Image (tube, rainbow, N blue to C red):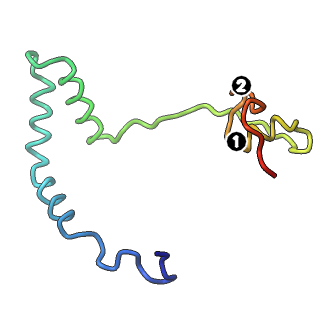
Amino acid sequence: MPFVKGQSGNPGGRPKVVGEVQELARSHTADAVTTLAEIMRDSEAAPAARVAAANALLDRGYGKPLQSSTVSVRRVNAREMSDDELAAIALGRSEGAADPADDPPIAH
């Protein structure tokens, strides 16, 4: 059923239970951080548990680290591209991907 313009798709708002669960979970924040710190410092704990606890503390204290990626972009006039290059773009393929000629023909 499509939404009517200007009318909320969720007129009741967020269910109250979600807010109650968040509030309950947040009331245990200090204990949770203390527990994570204890696990991180426990030399008898599994190394994976210690690392996970340390990462959780860092994520909560400083936020998750930013992720970066390198993207190479070249500007090309579509009129100068081959049919295969244009088909690869239309099919969502990147350069070096399988040859679009191996795909079934595109109906026009």
Secondary structure under tag 1 reads: loop
Instruction: Between residue 51 and residue 102, name the one nearer to us.
Output: 102
Query: Distance from label 1 to label 2 (Cα)?
Result: 13 Å
What type is the residue that disc 2 sits on? Gly
- Compared with residue 94, is residue 30 higher up or lower down, i.e. above or below? below
Q: Position of residue 82 (x, y in %)?
A: 88, 36
Decide if residue 11 is on the left or right side of residue 81.
left
Q: Position of residue 88 (x, y in %)?
A: 74, 37
What type is the residue that disc 1 sits on? Leu
Residue that badge 2 annotates: 96
Residue at x 10%, y 49% (from the top left corner)? 28
Q: Position of residue 102 (x, y in %)?
A: 74, 29
Image quadrant where residue 52 sits: top left
Secondary structure under tag 2 reads: loop
Q: In the image, which is nearer the foreground, mark 1 or mark 2?
A: 1
Pointer 1 with pointer 2, Cβ within 8 A: no
Instruction: Between residue 32 and residue 8, name the one nearer to us.
Output: 8
Q: Position of residue 45 (x, y in %)?
A: 11, 19
Label 2 crowd (10 A; few <14 / some 14-19 / many >=20): few
Residue at x 48%, y 83% (from the top left corner)? 6
| Tag of residue 91 | 1
Label 1 crowd (10 A; few <14 / some 14-19 / many >=20): few
